[in-house]
């Protein structure tokens, strides 16, 4: 029996890859100083994929997939991102934390983000400035907000926050299963942009000093140099009630309080167990009262070793010149900060 019905012609549509190329439909450029995970969440959102499922697209497993990629970016994921976006290799490496000499001072990542909510003394993996988030055209999280020695925003002078102001949980944009921007809490949907109080002035002075010294000391150092200032600060004990901990394991509240009390000389120079002197913290607190003098002393020491002229003018020391001198010394095995600490 033969059918008289007209035949249906099926012709395959052009494959998406042929029509649009390898790239994902919406391009998202990284913002200045942006953290890799923040860019990934924005990339996922712009292309219509909730962040929780974008990890599977990249082949990255685990609930905290994007925060893990900040700390270690496997070659396969890196290649995939280079293939499907217009980002270049130098840019993507710059978004990661893995290649930084300050890696050891980053806030610790817990396997389950909600664990950080069990104690307000424990660190969360990321902190943020609510005013920066509110003012950003497209809100994003900065790499500098992952440093445990940072407790305030240098731009706004306000305290950073490491928990949702509404429910108290740590940030978890990687678990978001709906298309909601990352400046809203993944647990309760509240805005994270609620302002914070100004940072204590003593804590801010000490924080600035530590930040300058870290940048100076890390110039030219290998990221795993055990003698670096970052490594030494990461190991240096911090008293927390009757116990001690180290700064990457502590919450923003505890770290801010520690720097404030240190600057006001309310902390004994020894930890409660008397095993480890808090000498390094103590020395930094002493120096914070005369920051310019310390920077000038370092400038002179670096310039002398690098064969440059000693500074003779009394103007405020130029940190850029100091960093240039430090870079010239990158092969010197003894750091100027170390030498100063030993003197
Ligand atoms: Zn800010
Ligand atoms: Zn919340």
Image (cartoon, helix red, strand yellow):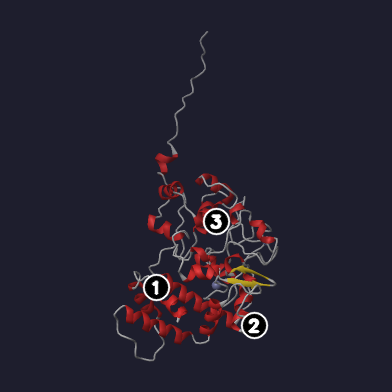
Q: Which residue corresponds to mark 1? A: 334
Q: Is residue 315 above or below residue 249?
A: below
Residue furthest to the top? 1
- Crowdedness near tag 1: few (<14), some (14–19) or many (≥20) residues, C-alpha within 10 Å: few
Is label 2 in a helix, a strand or a loop? Answer: loop
Q: Which residue corresponds to mark 2? A: 266
Is label 3 in a helix, a strand or a loop? Answer: helix
Q: Residue at x 53, y 54 (%)?
A: 68
Q: Residue at x 34, y 90 (%)?
A: 312
Is label 1 in a helix, a strand or a loop? Answer: loop
Whichever of labels 1 and 3 marks the residue nearer the N terminus, that label is 3
Whichever of labels 3 and 2 marks the residue nearer the N terminus, that label is 3
Q: Residue at x 56, y 67 (%)?
A: 133
Residue 67 got which mark? Answer: 3
Q: Is residue 18 above or below residue 157?
A: above
Image quarter for ligand 1: bottom right
Tell me the CA gap for discs 3 and 2: 36 Å
- Crowdedness near tag 3: few (<14), some (14–19) or many (≥20) residues, C-alpha within 10 Å: many
């Amino acid at each position: 029996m033969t059918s008289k019905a007209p035949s249906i012609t099926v012709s395959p549509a052009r494959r998406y890859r042929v029509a649009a190329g390898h790239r994902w439909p919406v391009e998202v450029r990284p913002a200045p100083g942006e953290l890799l995970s923040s860019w990934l969440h924005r990339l996922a959102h712009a292309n219509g994929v909730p962040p929780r499922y974008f990890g599977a697209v990249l082949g990255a497993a685990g609930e905290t997939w994007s925060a893990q990629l900040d700390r270690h970016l496997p070659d396969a994921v890196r290649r995939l991102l280079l293939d499907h976006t217009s980002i270049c290799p130098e840019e993507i490496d710059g978004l990661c934390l893995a290649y930084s000499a300050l890696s050891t001072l980053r806030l610790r990542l817990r396997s389950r983000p909600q664990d950080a909510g069990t104690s307000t003394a424990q660190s969360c993996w990321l902190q943020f400035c609510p005013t920066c988030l509110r003012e950003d055209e497209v809100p994003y999280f900065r790499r500098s907000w992952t440093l445990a020695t940072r407790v305030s925003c240098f731009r706004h002078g306000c305290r950073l926050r490491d928990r949702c102001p509404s429910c108290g949980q740590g940030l978890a944009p990687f678990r978001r299963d709906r298309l909601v921007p990352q400046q809203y809490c993944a647990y309760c949907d509240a805005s994270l942009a609620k302002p914070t109080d100004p940072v204590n002035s003593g804590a801010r002075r000490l924080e600035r000093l530590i930040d300058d010294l870290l940048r100076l000391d890390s110039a030219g150092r290998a990221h795993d140099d055990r003698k670096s200032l970052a490594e030494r600060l990461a190991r240096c004990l911090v008293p927390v009630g009757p116990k001690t901990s180290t700064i990457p394991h502590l919450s923003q509240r505890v770290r801010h309080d520690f720097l404030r009390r240190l600057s006001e000389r309310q902390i004994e120079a020894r930890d409660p167990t008397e095993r480890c002197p808090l000498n390094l913290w103590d020395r930094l607190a002493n120096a914070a009262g005369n920051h310019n003098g310390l920077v000038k002393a370092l400038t002179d020491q670096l310039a002398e070793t690098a064969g440059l002229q000693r500074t003779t003018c009394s103007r405020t020391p130029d940190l850029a010149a100091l960093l240039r001198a430090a870079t010239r010394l990158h092969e010197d095995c003894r750091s100027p900060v170390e030498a100063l600490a030993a003197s």
